[in-house]
Image: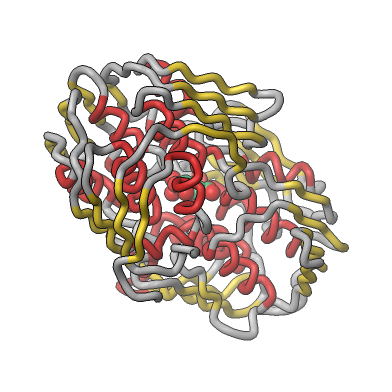
Amino acid sequence: MSFDAVEAVRVTGAGPAVGALCVPGDKSVSHRSLLLAALAHGTSTVTGLSRGQDVTHTRRAIERFGVVIEDDGHGRLRVEGPLRHEPDDVLDAGNAGTGIRLMAGVCAGVDGVSVLTGDQFLRRRPMSRIADPLREMGAHVDGREHGQFAPLLIRGGNLHGITYAPRVASAQVKSAIMLAGLSAEGSTTVVEAHPTRRHTEEMLLGFGGRVRVEETRVTVEPGPLTSADVAVPGDPSQAAFWAVAALLAEGGSVVVEDLYTGFGRSDFVGVLRRMGAAIEFDEVTGTLTVRSSRLRAVELTAADIPGIVDEVPVLTIAAAAAEGTTVISGAGELRAKESDRIAHTCGMLRAFGVTVTETEDGMVIEGGAKLRPGTVNSHGDHRLAMAAAVAAACATAGETLITGWDSVATSYPGFMEDLVRLTGVGVAAAGDEV
Ligand code: S3P
């Protein structure tokens, strides 16, 4: 049976994680492949797209602009750009911060009115970070509580380029500005305090965009895009779950193939290596190889965070099992993710019997813990649910209850089936189908 749509699961720990697998198509690349194909003139093709709900929301949203998408039923999409008109309905990004923020950048460049919204979690996430620069470029952006939260209303068109230094290190903010910059008058530059993932830069070049990257400064020139064929690589952030699952139990050994190899997405490999992990990442083939290892604590600071921003929850499970005290600081941005990932990661660790102290911008984790089964609420956050499932698989005998499991379908349908195959855990649905 599939566990994707069940509200809660019971997981009974078992043996080490052993095996080889491919993970879903990269979520960041998937969103961008749809949006850029929608902006481009001509027919683009996309293979390997993430089947997660986040990306499905972006796919439905671009259809609202009159973009025709055909699915050949064998994993290949044909996308007929460019956008034909303002959206004919509200754009619903679901749970996806990337979806709503990048779409806002696109909408700012569309002559007309767009309304963007999302689920109860997304509607609580900060939007001023994109609303402010898009307004500076000439778009009219409004939203709940003085433009801070979705639903957002954007009246786009007539933009002019700006030079902007975002307050937070965020590829979503950078990308929203760059996408708006495509239809602005003059060039648009974003200057980052810490470098973030460069998918938009890389992919815009593939779609004929004019982009210049100089360390932490990226400049986009306006101009039309041309269609392209995108093969979405595997998602390194999803592979991180299997890396930690392989590390924690004696005899663990996992190979993940066909991962994205570009900038800013595989920093968790370096962090685990600093912790003493036997982990290799082949940057030519995108193959990750991990063997069970004795781990030691690590110190993670602000400069580390943009490169592991999505991997922190599962890395804390590794830290809990490691020798020594792990200190994470400069990670305040995690409070603005799908959930407050500082508070709720601490809650998850405590549920497994780990001693952890929450700080304003991070946490202090006492290592050497024997994880024991517990009850964890994902708070609607897919990465917390999956990190808890990995911890449950590595825990001492007994049963872990994870509620809010259905959030996993936003990014990794089939996660539980992969966990069962690799570790032999016992799983039972404990809640209703949602
Ligand atoms: C993403 C950027 C990151 C990351 C998110 C995907 C992207 O968010 O957490 O999962 O695709 O640009 P921030 O830019 O808000 O850090």
In the image, what residue occupies the spot 75% across and 59% down?
Answer: 75
Quadrant of residue 332 in the image? top left
Residue 181 visible in the displayed image: no
User: Residue 55 location in percent, x, y?
Assistant: 58, 62
Q: Nearer the viewer, residue 112 or 311?
A: 311
In the image, what residue occupies the spot 49% across and 26% down?
Answer: 253
In the image, what residue occupies the spot 64% across and 79% down?
Answer: 87
Q: Is residue 134 left or right of residue 167?
A: right
In the image, what residue occupies the spot 71% across and 57% down?
Answer: 36
Residue sitting at the far bottom: 88
Q: Nearer the viewer, residue 56 or 201?
A: 56
Q: From the viewer's perspective, is residue 397 above or below residue 100?
A: above
Q: Is residue 354 left or right of residue 316?
A: left
Residue 329 visible in the displayed image: yes
Q: From the viewer's perspective, is residue 294 above or below residue 53?
A: above
User: Residue 143 location in percent, x, y?
Assistant: 40, 73
Q: From the viewer's perspective, is residue 434 above or below residue 31?
A: below
| Viewport quadrant of the C terminus | bottom left
Q: Is residue 307 left or right of residue 70?
A: left
Q: Nearer the viewer, residue 100 or 373?
A: 373
Q: From the viewer's perspective, is residue 186 above or below residue 122?
A: above
User: Residue 67 location in percent, x, y?
Assistant: 75, 73
Q: Nearer the viewer, residue 127 or 312?
A: 312
Q: How many marks?
A: 0
Q: How is the image coloured?
A: secondary structure
User: Residue 389 location in percent, x, y?
Assistant: 34, 47
